[in-house]
Amino acid sequence: MKLSRKNGLRASAIGALVVSGALVLSACGSDNNTATPDKKDGGSTSAAASNIACEGAKGQLLAAGSSAQKNAMDLWVKNFQAACSGVEINYQAIGSGGGITKFNQGQVAFAGSDSALKEEEVTESQKICKGGKGVNLPMVGGPIAIGYKLEGVDNLVLDAATIAKIFDNKITKWNDEAIAKLNPGAKLPDSTIQAFHRSDESGTTQNLGKYLSTAAAADWKHDPKSKSWPAQGGQAANGSSGVATAVKDAEGSIGYFELSYATANKISTVSINTGAAAPVAASSENASKAIAAAKVKGTGSDLALSLDYATKAEGAYPIVLVTYEIACDKGNKAETLPTLKAFLNYTVSEEGQKVLADAGYAPLPAEIAAKVRTIVPTLS
């Protein structure tokens, strides 16, 4: 999955995202219509693979969860397996909720999730992580785009309150006064809005909910922690691929998905009026400005991040997510622990993060990546 690439920000005190490619995340559901990462040359994969330390990795490692990581996982797995003979990494992109469920049932060595573990999920993980618990290890981040199909309208601007009302079925016509006010001069039709949302449990849904609950608290009264779609009305589709396909095919439609899906399907995306001097487009660089200000809210080995969804910083795109690998800090299975540590050591290494840019992803903020690198070797 490729987005237009931009050279981005340098590391700041918290480690601004190092962006040399577009920040792309494919969906956090079971999705298949992802674009294949482009390789202009074969050097990045082979070079990265040659620097991988296998460190006792052997046999099969099972993992599951968010497919926001799918293309990154595909690349990491390819490189790791090429370097470490006899190792098989099997990552199932079944959605954040499904991945956490499998992890807490002891079916997988780690889970991918677009949101940090809830308190009750951490408690549940203690049954599997003997003497320990599940911890959140961030790996990559990206923007959630609001995509739409509306003939004759190429540069739609919305704010948080209007987005909330659209997805809550309170604004139902494209020429509604609230939309018209944000788009003076646009030829908005007197037609019904077809709003699409995820049918599966999704970290993308949860992050959109957190944004709306923070930036439009008066208009979005639903549970911001819910991975399931909480509002009435609208139409449901499975995975970001399903939502993107629905929006692409239906005139007058709107939906939410990772930016890569908009690019792969040539779907127009909304610019957000955040209160800054100008509306902010969904792009890698603009998402980076928001994610770079994230703060670690986890303690000890847990690196869950707190994002500022209500940011008004110039050029900062506010609807973002960070995707995590969730593993036991203690109590991992002895037969899979060496492979788990070797693989995660690679994914968060400079080499592992570097290939993300070539694949259209954005590497972690420098300071966060450094913290993850200190924690992975301590998993036991």
Image (spheres, rainbow, N blue to C red):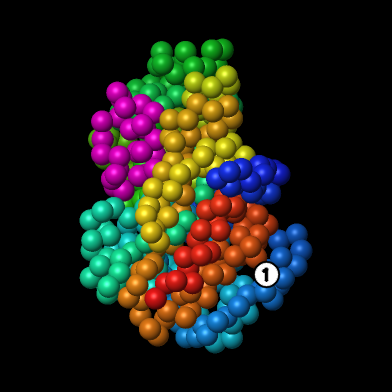
Compared to 252, does 189 lie above or below? above
Q: Quadrant of the N terminus?
A: bottom right
- Residue under the image location 66 percent in, 42 percent down: 9
Q: Nearer the viewer, residue 328 or 58?
A: 328
Compared to 209, does 47 lie above or below? below
Q: With 121 as the anchor, is 291 left or right in this view?
A: right
Mark 1 — residue?
48
- Residue under the image location 55 percent in, 42 percent down: 292
Which element carries disc 1, helix, strand or loop? Answer: helix
Category of crowding for the residue at label 1, using alpha-carbon neighbours closer than 10 angstroms: few (below 14), some (14–19), many (at least 20)? many
Q: Give the residue type that dot 1 points to.
A: Ala
Question: Residue 21, percent across and down?
Answer: 66, 49
- Residue under the image location 55 percent in, 33 percent down: 316
Q: With 129 as the anchor, is 24 left or right in this view?
A: right
Let me know if residue 120 appears in the view.
Answer: yes
Let me know if residue 153 appears in the view.
Answer: no
Q: Nearer the viewer, residue 6 or 263?
A: 6
Q: Nearer the viewer, residue 316 or 187?
A: 316
Q: Nearer the viewer, residue 364 or 250?
A: 364
Q: Quadrant of residue 37?
A: bottom right
Compared to 37, does 204 lie above or below? above
Question: Residue 125, percent across and down?
Answer: 27, 65
Question: Residue 51, percent across and down?
Answer: 67, 74
- Residue under the image location 49 percent in, 21 percent down: 275
Question: Residue 330, percent across and down?
Answer: 34, 72
Is residue 149 found inside the magenta-colored segment of the image?
no
- The range drawn in magenta is 205-229
